[in-house]
Amino acid sequence: MTQSSRVISSLLRSALPALMLLPALRAGADGPKPEVKSVEPKYVVAGRTTTILIYGENLTVKSVSTSKLPLKVKLLEVKATDPKAKSPGSKVASFEVTVSPDCPPENAEITLVQTDGTKLTTSLPVTEKAAEDIAIKKPAATFKQAMPLTGTSAAITGQLDGDVPDLIRFDAKAGETWSITLACGRIGSMLDPILRLRDSRHIPLALSVGDKKKDRHILFHPTADGTYYIELTEGEAKGGAGYTYRLSVTRK
């Protein structure tokens, strides 16, 4: 073997390990990317601490951060999803979310930092706080059946069924201020909601419609003491599973 042949052979032997690493490095760069598939529960409430679960694929979360809204997020653990349970992803990361009482009803951005430094961002809706959370009591499709509210601050959760409305009644006095907020699309519902306020004679006083991804809102200043009705309907008369809502009714 000539001198030049021996030099070339030596160079090839020294370069071989690096060449063998190239496929592995390429596989890592082009490997499966992390993905967030769903968040449970769909929203958190102002003034509370809630444990949320983020399901996805290839999650190796090492830290978490948030911006824009006054809330704190603490990473609890990341583990494989129970194979016996129906889940939207093979990995689940759990977090403790503490929301300030004065946090506005908007969407927070949650950033998940992976062990390799890559980042994922997902949205976490925040809803208004209320003194009590209650489920709609059905039937509530007529003014006679309207579910009564006895307090001055409540959040009612429910589901609309096709063209059947949900009605809630409450008593108010002249000079008071009532805030009525309906969250649907922003918290993952398929509802295209119509929010109406009616007086004791069932005459409409206010209407809130628009982009179904945005909350409906009515700020009400009664001019007379009496019973008032909140009416919820679906814009296209659709309903059933997935057509859910959270209605906040609070006297300010």
Image (tube, rainbow, N blue to C red):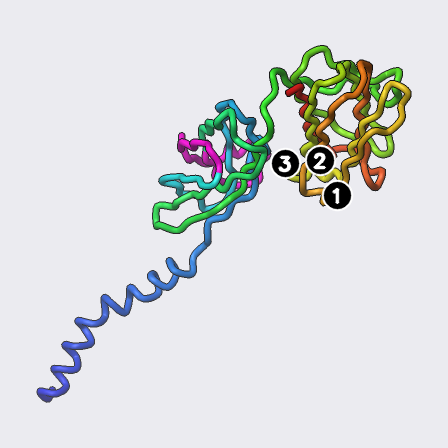
Residue 136 lies within the magenta run: no
**Eye-nearest disc, 3 or 1:** 1
Relative to 13, is 109 on the left or the right?
Answer: right
Q: Nearer the viewer, residue 49 or 75?
A: 49
Whole-angstrom CA distance, mark 3 to mark 1, is 16 Å
Instruction: Name which quarter of the figure residue 65 lies in.
Output: top left
| Tag 3 near tag 1, CB within 8 Å | no
Which element is circle 1 on? Answer: loop
| Tag 2 near tag 1, CB within 8 Å | yes
Q: Which residue is mark 3?
A: 187
Whole-angstrom CA distance, mark 3 to mark 2, is 12 Å
Disc 2 marks a residue whose amino acid type is: Arg
Disc 1 marks a residue whose amino acid type is: Gly
**Position above or below: 192 against 224:** below
Q: Going 51% across and 30% down the picture, which residue do you hit?
A: 52
**Eye-nearest disc, 3 or 2:** 2
Q: Residues within 10 Å of mark 3 (few under 14, many from 20)?
A: many
Q: Which residue is mark 2?
A: 216
The region drawn magenta spans 69-93
Relative to 183, is 123 on the left or the right?
Answer: left
The image's mark for residue 210 is 1
